[in-house]
Image (tube, coloured by chain):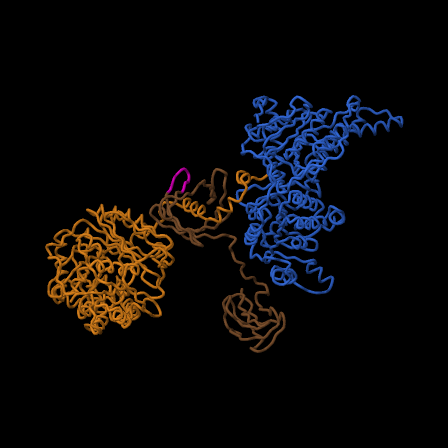
Chain colours: A blue, B brown, C orange
C-alpha cells in the first residue's frame, strides 16, 4: 500500500487559523466532558462519602486492567436536556479490558440524582446493551441506582425501547451465551433489581449493596411489615438465604477484585478473522487534523488528508481513483485491522453512488469491515441527475450498504445532511459505532438552507395574504428559525440525544475506531444478503 | 494485574503492563520498563531495567518473593488484592448457626459463656444418617446453645448463637 | 584406647563439622535426630542416624539418659558433645563414664570448676593470674551491696551461674545499684535457677579476646593463639577473627602465655578456651574458661593449620599433643562470620521460614560450616545460627575483602538472615581500622542497619516479573490494547 502524499502546508495561514479554531472548540469540548465526569454538587459527593462508596470513575479503574484503554460512549449524553442537571445521563458506558477480555460496561453514576434512570439514561444503557448484542461482548453492570426517575416515568417505562428493553436485552445476551456480571454497589430496587438477577453472575457489596423489588418504605406502605434494608435485601441475606446473589464482597476493592476473578473464568472468545497487518503509527501527525478541518463548515477539504492521519503508516490503496471522485474509496489498516474506507469529497453523484455500491460489495466479498467518513451534503439534485437516475443509483448504494454483513463504523467528520447520511451509514443503518467530531452537523439539510426553506413557506403565505415584507420583516421571520435550526443540527444536540455514540476529539478517532473494530470481531461475520438492486 | 508488594514493612501498590516492546512496572508513580530473563545458575536471572542489566537470584513462595541482589537478600511480600477474604460482617447472619436440615444434636462442644475462635466446633448434629460439625462463623463468645445432645430440631432452628460483637 | 565409633551428641553445623573430621580419621559416626527436625547436613554424611525423643527437639538433645542410651544402642565408644547442649555438663560426663563410654572433652572436675564462674575466678586469682576487681556474693552475702560499691562504678553484675550474657547488667551509679541487683537476681533465678550474683568492675570499651588451648591431661598444654571476639550483639559474638588487630607481639605472647598457664593449672585435657576482657590500656582480666570446642574455633584452624576436632579425638583416645608450642604459628588472617536467621533491623528478632534457595560461596580461602540444606525449615526450636562462613587471607585487609565477597555471594533465600548486616560490619571504617569493642555494634547500630542504596525499583520490577500469574494476566491482553495503554476518550 502506498503512503498518501499530503499536500497540507502546516505553515499556511489558513491551516493555522483552522488549527486555532479547532483547538478552541476542543478546549470547550474537553471542559464539558470534565464537568460531566467530575463536577457534582457538594452534597452529592458528601452523600457518597457517607455511604462509603467509591465514585463511578474509581470503580471503573478498579475493574479495568491497568494500562489498557477504555472507549467511553456518549460522554455528553443529556448535555442539552433536563436543564443540564443529569451529566452523562447519570450512567457511564463503554468498552474496556478486564482480565484480557473485551467487555461492555454499564455503570450507574450515583453522584447524579442517586443514579436515577432518566429517559436518556435508559437510552444510553439500551444502546450499550445493543452494542453488546451486536458484538457479542460480555457485559459488566455496576449497579447503583435509585430506580426510574418518577416525574419522567412516561419516558422511562412504557415504550418498546425504554426500561423493559434493558432487561429484554439481558435475556437476549444470556440466550446468546454472552456472559454478564453485575456488581451491586448500591440499591437495586424494583426494575433495577432485575439487572443483577438477570446477570449470569453477580456480586453484592456488604453494607452498601442491596437488591429488592420494593424497598423498606414501600413494603411498609404495602403490607405494614417493618423491615431493615439488610434483612430485606442485603448481601448476607441474598448470598446465603435467597440465592439471588452469588458472591458477597467485604468492600468495594474486594468486590472489583472478585469481579476480575469472575471475568477471568469466562471463555476467551473465538474472534472473527479478518486481514491484519503489523501495527504502524500514521506517518502524518494526527494532530494536523486540527488544521485540516476548515473552520468554516462550508469549505471543502480533501478526505485523503484525514485518512492519512488516521490509518497505519498513512498508507491507502485507493479504489477507482479517477472515477466518481466525489467519493474516495480504498483499503487501509487501522491498528493493524484491514478496513475499507468510504469518504466524501463532495456531493454524491451517479458515478460516486455506483462506485460506493460496488466497493461495499468488494469489502463484503473480502470480509473487510467498512469505515465511513462523512462530509456529505446529499445526493446531487436537478433535472439532469434525476434523468440519469440519481435516486435509483443512490438506492443501489443504500441497498448494498444495508445488505452488508461486515461490521460498519461511521465517523461524522463534518456535514451529515439528507439522504447522504443514509448512504454513508447514518444512525439508522446499524453501524457498530458512530462518532461525531465536535464541529460536525447533522440534519435533513444545512441550517441556512433549512431556515430559508421554512422562512420561504411563511413568507409566501404572507404574500398570498397580500402582505409586502421589508427585508427587516423577512429577517425577523427567518433569523429565529435559523438560530433554532443551527442549534438543533449541532453535534452537542446529537450527542445529548444519543443519536451518536459520542463526540470525539479528532485525534482520538484512530483509537476509537480500532477498539470498535476489535470489539466487533467478537461476533462472527456472516454472508451478505442483498435485496433487489434497481438497475 | 495489580499486586500489593511489601518491602521492609512499606507497602507498594504496583501494576504491570506491556507496551508491545516489553513489560512496564508501574510503581511509586513511575513507569519502569523492564524484562527478566533466566541466566546461568540456580535461581539466577538478569533484570534489564533503565538500560541496566542487573544479575540477581530469585525464588518465589506463595506469599513472598525472595531476591538476592548486590550481595543482599530481600524479602518482598506479595498480595493479590483479589485474594482478600470476605471479612465477617456485622449482620445478624453472622451471629447465628441455623440448622441446615432437620436432625438431632449429637454432642455440644462449647456452651454459653465459652470463647470460641472462628472455625472452632460448637456442636455436632446428625441428620440423614450423616454427622455434621457446625463451627463458629467468627471469633466470639457463645451466648446460647438451645438444644442438648439427643434433642431433635427442625430446619432453620437456631442451634447456637454468638453474643453480639462489641464495637 | 582407640575410638572406633563416635556419636555426635549435637546438631546443625557443628555436628556436620565433627562428622567430617571423624570420618576422615576413619571413624564410624552416628548422629542424632528428633522427629521434628528435617534432614540437616550432618544426617547426609553420617554413617548412622539415631532417633531421639522428647516434647521438643531441644529437650531431646538435653536428655542425658536418652543420649547415653543412644550411644549404647549404636555401640559408640565415644561421644563428642559439640558446643552447647551437654558440652559442659559434668553429670553427662559421669553418666557416660558409668556406661563405659568415652567423653570427648575435659574431666568432670574441670567442667565443674570452670562451670562455676565464682569458683573459677577465685581459682585463677589465687594462682596469680589477673582478674578484674570484684565483689563475690558468696564470700559474705550480708555485705554484698557494700562490697560491690567499693569495687566502684561502672560495675558489671552477673549471675554466678551465668553465661552467654544472660542476666548481665551494667550499673553506672550508686542510686540504682540495689534495684539492679534485685533485677539481676530475679533473672539469674529465672535463667539458671540460681540467684547468686557477683559484681566486677566494668571495663569501658572492652574487647573480648580469647585464647585457644589444647592440653593432653598429663600436664602438657599448648596455646593456638588468640581470637578477637569483640563483635557482639546482645553479648553474643557474630564475627571473630585472628590474629587480634589490638595486640602487638608482646601483648599477644603475654595473653597467650597466661591462658596456657591457667589451662596448665587445671591440668587441662582436650581443647578449651580461656576468655579475657581486654581493656583499652592493654590490661586484661580473666573472664571465664570454656571447656569445650568453641563455635569460632575454625579461625584458629585456618591460621594454624591444626584441625582442633582431630586434636580432641586424638587426645580423647589417649594420644598426646600433635604439635609442640614452637611449631604452632599464625599464618595469615582468618575471619568467621556467623550466619544467623535473624532480622538485624528488628532488634535481631529470630527469623523463621524455609530455605528455598541456597548457594554457598566458594573459592580459595573460603570455608563454610553449614547445618542447613535447601528445603531446611528454620524454626525457633534451635539457635538461630545456620552456618559459619570462614575466610582466610594473607593479611587482615585481604581477609576482609575476601569475607565481603564471600558473604555477598552467600545466597540464602526464604528466611531472613544477617548476611547483609555482616557485610555492613565488614565495610564499617571502624572495623576496617580494628577500632572496635564489645559495644561496637550497639554504638553503630544506626549505620549498620541503615537501608542500603535504594533498590526498591529493582525489587519491585523483579517481584512483578517473576509473578507468573501476574505476567500471564498481562499477556492475556490483546496486543493492540496493550499498546494503546490507558487511553481514554
Q: How many marks?
A: 0
Per the rendered image, the range of residues in magenta is B47-54
The residue shown at (56%, 57%) is A250
**Residue B146: quadrant of the picture:** bottom right
Percent position (x, y) of residue A301? 65, 24
Percent position (x, y) of residue C277? 20, 59
Q: Give whichever of A118, B73 is nearer the camera.
A: B73
The residue shown at (11%, 63%) is C220
Q: Does A372 appear in magenta?
A: no
**Which residue is the extreme one toward the right?**
A465
Work out whether residue C224 can be spotted: yes
Seen in the image, is B81 located left or right of residue C270?
Answer: right
Q: Quadrant of the N terminus of chain A?
A: top right
Does A514 sit above or below residue C29? Answer: above
Does A375 sit above or below residue B113? Answer: above
Percent position (x, y) of residue B30? 46, 42
Percent position (x, y) of residue C450? 35, 49
Q: Give whichever of C369, B96 is nearer the camera.
A: C369
Q: Main secondary structure of the magenta part?
A: strand
Does C18 sit above or below residue A409? Answer: below
Work out whether residue A43 can be spotted: no
Seen in the image, is C108 located left or right of residue B26?
Answer: left
Seen in the image, is C376 located left or right of residue A306?
Answer: left
Q: Quadrant of the C terminus of chain A?
A: top right
Amino acid at each position: 500500500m502506498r503512503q498518501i502524499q499530503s499536500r497540507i502546508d502546516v505553515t499556511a495561514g489558513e491551516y493555522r487559523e483552522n488549527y486555532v479554531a479547532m483547538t478552541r472548540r476542543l478546549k470547550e469540548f474537553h471542559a464539558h466532558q470534565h464537568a460531566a465526569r467530575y463536577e457534582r454538587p457538594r452534597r452529592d459527593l458528601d452523600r457518597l462519602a457517607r455511604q462509603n462508596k467509591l465514585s463511578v470513575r474509581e470503580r471503573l479503574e478498579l475493574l479495568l486492567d491497568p494500562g489498557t484503554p477504555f472507549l467511553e460512549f456518549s460522554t455528553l449524553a443529556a448535555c442539552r436536556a433536563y436543564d443540564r442537571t443529569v451529566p452523562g445521563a447519570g450512567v457511564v458506558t463503554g468498552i474496556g479490558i478486564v482480565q484480557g477480555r473485551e467487555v461492555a460496561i454499564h455503570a450507574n453514576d450515583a453522584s447524579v440524582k442517586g443514579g436515577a434512570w432518566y429517559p436518556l439514561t435508559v437510552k444510553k444503557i439500551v444502546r450499550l446493551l445493543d452494542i453488546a448484542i451486536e458484538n457479542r461482548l460480555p457485559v459488566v453492570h455496576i449497579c447503583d441506582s435509585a430506580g426510574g426517575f418518577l416525574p419522567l416515568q412516561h419516558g422511562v417505562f412504557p415504550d418498546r425501547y425504554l426500561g423493559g428493553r434493558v432487561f429484554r436485552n439481558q435475556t437476549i445476551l444470556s440466550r446468546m451465551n454472552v456472559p454478564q456480571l453485575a456488581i451491586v454497589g448500591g440499591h437495586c430496587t424494583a426494575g433495577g433489581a432485575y439487572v443483577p438477577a438477570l446477570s449470569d453472575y453477580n456480586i453484592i457489596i456488604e453494607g452498601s449493596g442491596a437488591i429488592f423489588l420494593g424497598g423498606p418504605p414501600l413494603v411498609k406502605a404495602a403490607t405494614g411489615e417493618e423491615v431493615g434494608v439488610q434483612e430485606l435485601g442485603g448481601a448476607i441475606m441474598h448470598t446465603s438465604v435467597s440465592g439471588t446473589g452469588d458472591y458477597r464482597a467485604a468492600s468495594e476493592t474486594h468486590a472489583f477484585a472478585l469481579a476480575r476473578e469472575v471475568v477471568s473464568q469466562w471463555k476467551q472468545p473465538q474472534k472473527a478473522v479478518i486481514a491484519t497487518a503489523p501495527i504502524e503509527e500514521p506517518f502524518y501527525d494526527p494532530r494536523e487534523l486540527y488544521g485540516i478541518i476548515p473552520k468554516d463548515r462550508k469549505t471543502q477539504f480533501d478526505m485523503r488528508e484525514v485518512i492519512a492521519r488516521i490509518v497505519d503508516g498513512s498508507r491507502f490503496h485507493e479504489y477507482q481513483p479517477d472515477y466518481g471522485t466525489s467519493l474516495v474509496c480504498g483499503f487501509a489498516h487501522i491498528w493493524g485491522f484491514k478496513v475499507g474506507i468510504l469518504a466524501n469529497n463532495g456531493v454524491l453523484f451517479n458515478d460516486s453512488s455506483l462506485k460506493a455500491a460496488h466497493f461495499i460489495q468488494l469489502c463484503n466479498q473480502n470480509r473487510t469491515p467498512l469505515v465511513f467518513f462523512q462530509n456529505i451534503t446529499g445526493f446531487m439534485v436537478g433535472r439532469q441527475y434525476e434523468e440519469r437516475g440519481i435516486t435509483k443509483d443512490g438506492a443501489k448504494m443504500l441497498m448494498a450498504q444495508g445488505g452488508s454483513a461486515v461490521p460498519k463504523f461511521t465517523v461524522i467528520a463534518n456535514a451529515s445532511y439528507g439522504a447522504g447520511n443514509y448512504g454513508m451509514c447514518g444512525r439508522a443503518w446499524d453501524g457498530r459505532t458512530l462518532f461525531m467530531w465536535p464541529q460536525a452537523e447533522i440534519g435533513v439539510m444545512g441550517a441556512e438552507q433549512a431556515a430559508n426553506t421554512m422562512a420561504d413557506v411563511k413568507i409566501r403565505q404572507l404574500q398570498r395574504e397580500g402582505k409586502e415584507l421589508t427585508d427587516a420583516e423577512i429577517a425577523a421571520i427567518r433569523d429565529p428559525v435559523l438560530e433554532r435550526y443551527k442549534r438543533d443540527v449541532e453535534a452537542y444536540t446529537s450527542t445529548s440525544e444519543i443519536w451518536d455514540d459520542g463526540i470525539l476529539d479528532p485525534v482520538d478517532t484512530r483509537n476509537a475506531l480500532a477498539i470498535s473494530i476489535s470489539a466487533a470481531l467478537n461476533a462472527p461475520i456472516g454472508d451478505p444478503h442483498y435485496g433487489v438492486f434497481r438497475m | 494485574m495489580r499486586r500489593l508488594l511489601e518491602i521492609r514493612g512499606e507497602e507498594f501498590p504496583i501494576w504491570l503492563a506491556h507496551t508491545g516492546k516489553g513489560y512496564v512496572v508501574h510503581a511509586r508513580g513511575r513507569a519502569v520498563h523492564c524484562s527478566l530473563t533466566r541466566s546461568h545458575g540456580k535461581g539466577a536471572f538478569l533484570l534489564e531495567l533503565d538500560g541496566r542489566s542487573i544479575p540477581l537470584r530469585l525464588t518465589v513462595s506463595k506469599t513472598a518473593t525472595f531476591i538476592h541482589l548486590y550481595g543482599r537478600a530481600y524479602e518482598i511480600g506479595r498480595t493479590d488484592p483479589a485474594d482478600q477474604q470476605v471479612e465477617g460482617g456485622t449482620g445478624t447472619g453472622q451471629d447465628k448457626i441455623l440448622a441446615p436440615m432437620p436432625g438431632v444434636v449429637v454432642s455440644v462442644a462449647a456452651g454459653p459463656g465459652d470463647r470460641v475462635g472462628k472455625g472452632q466446633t460448637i456442636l455436632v448434629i446428625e441428620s440423614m444418617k450423616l454427622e455434621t460439625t457446625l463451627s463458629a462463623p467468627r471469633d466470639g463468645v457463645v451466648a446460647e446453645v438451645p438444644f442438648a445432645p439427643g434433642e431433635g430440631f427442625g430446619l432453620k432452628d437456631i442451634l447456637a448463637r454468638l453474643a453480639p460483637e462489641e464495637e | 584406647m582407640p575410638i572406633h565409633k563416635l556419636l555426635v551428641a549435637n546438631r546443625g553445623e557443628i555436628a556436620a563439622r565433627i562428622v567430617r573430621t571423624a570420618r576422615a580419621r576413619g571413624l564410624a559416626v552416628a548422629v542424632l535426630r528428633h522427629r521434628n527436625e528435617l534432614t540437616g547436613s550432618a544426617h547426609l554424611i553420617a554413617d548412622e542416624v539415631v532417633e531421639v525423643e522428647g516434647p521438643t527437639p531441644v529437650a531431646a538433645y538435653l536428655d542425658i539418659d536418652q543420649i547415653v542410651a543412644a550411644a549404647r544402642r549404636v555401640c559408640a565408644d565415644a561421644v563428642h558433645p559439640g558446643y552447647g547442649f551437654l558440652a559442659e555438663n559434668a553429670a553427662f560426663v559421669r553418666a557416660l563414664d558409668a556406661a563405659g563410654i568415652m567423653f570427648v572433652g575435659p574431666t568432670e572436675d574441670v567442667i565443674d570448676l570452670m562451670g562455676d564462674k565464682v569458683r573459677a575466678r577465685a581459682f585463677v586469682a589465687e594462682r596469680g593470674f589477673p582478674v578484674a576487681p570484684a565483689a563475690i556474693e558468696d564470700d559474705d552475702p550480708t555485705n554484698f551491696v557494700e562490697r560491690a560499691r567499693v569495687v566502684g562504678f561502672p560495675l558489671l553484675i552477673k549471675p554466678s551461674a551465668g553465661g552467654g550474657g544472660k542476666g548481665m547488667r551494667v550499673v553506672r551509679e550508686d542510686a540504682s545499684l540495689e534495684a539492679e541487683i534485685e533485677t539481676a537476681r530475679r533473672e539469674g533465678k529465672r535463667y539458671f535457677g540460681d540467684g547468686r550474683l557477683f559484681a566486677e568492675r566494668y571495663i569501658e570499651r572492652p574487647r573480648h579476646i580469647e585464647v585457644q588451648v589444647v592440653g593432653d591431661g598429663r600436664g602438657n598444654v599448648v596455646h593456638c593463639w588468640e581470637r578477637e571476639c569483640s563483635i557482639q550483639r546482645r553479648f553474643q559474638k557474630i564475627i571473630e577473627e585472628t590474629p587480634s588487630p589490638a595486640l602487638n607481639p608482646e601483648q599477644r605472647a603475654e595473653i597467650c602465655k597466661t591462658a596456657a598457664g591457667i589451662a596448665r593449672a587445671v591440668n587441662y585435657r582436650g581443647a578449651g578456651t580461656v576468655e579475657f576482657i581486654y581493656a583499652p590500656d592493654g590490661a586484661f582480666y580473666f573472664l571465664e574458661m570454656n571447656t569445650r570446642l568453641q563455635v569460632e574455633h575454625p579461625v584458629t584452624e585456618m591460621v594454624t593449620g591444626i584441625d582442633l576436632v582431630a586434636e580432641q579425638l586424638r587426645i580423647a583416645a589417649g594420644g598426646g599433643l600433635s604439635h609442640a608450642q614452637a611449631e604452632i604459628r599464625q599464618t595469615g588472617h582468618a575471619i568467621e562470620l556467623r550466619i544467623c536467621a535473624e532480622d538485624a533491623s528488628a532488634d535481631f528478632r529470630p527469623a523463621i521460614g524455609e530455605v528455598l534457595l541456597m548457594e554457598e560461596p566458594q573459592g580459595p580461602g573460603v570455608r563454610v560450616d553449614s547445618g542447613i540444606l535447601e528445603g531446611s525449615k528454620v524454626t525457633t526450636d534451635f539457635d538461630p545460627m545456620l552456618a559459619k562462613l570462614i575466610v582466610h587471607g594473607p593479611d587482615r585487609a585481604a581477609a576482609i575483602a575476601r569475607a565481603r565477597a564471600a558473604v555477598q555471594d552467600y545466597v540464602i533465600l526464604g528466611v531472613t538472615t544477617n548476611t547483609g548486616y555482616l557485610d555492613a560490619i565488614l565495610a564499617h571504617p571502624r572495623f576496617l581500622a580494628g577500632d572496635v569493642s564489645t559495644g561496637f555494634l550497639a554504638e553503630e547500630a544506626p549505620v549498620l542497619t541503615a537501608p542500603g542504596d535504594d533498590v526498591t525499583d529493582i525489587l519491585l520490577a523483579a517481584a512483578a516479573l517473576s509473578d507468573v500469574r501476574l505476567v500471564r494476566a498481562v499477556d492475556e491482553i490483546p496486543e493492540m490494547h496493550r499498546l494503546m495503554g490507558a487511553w481514554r476518550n
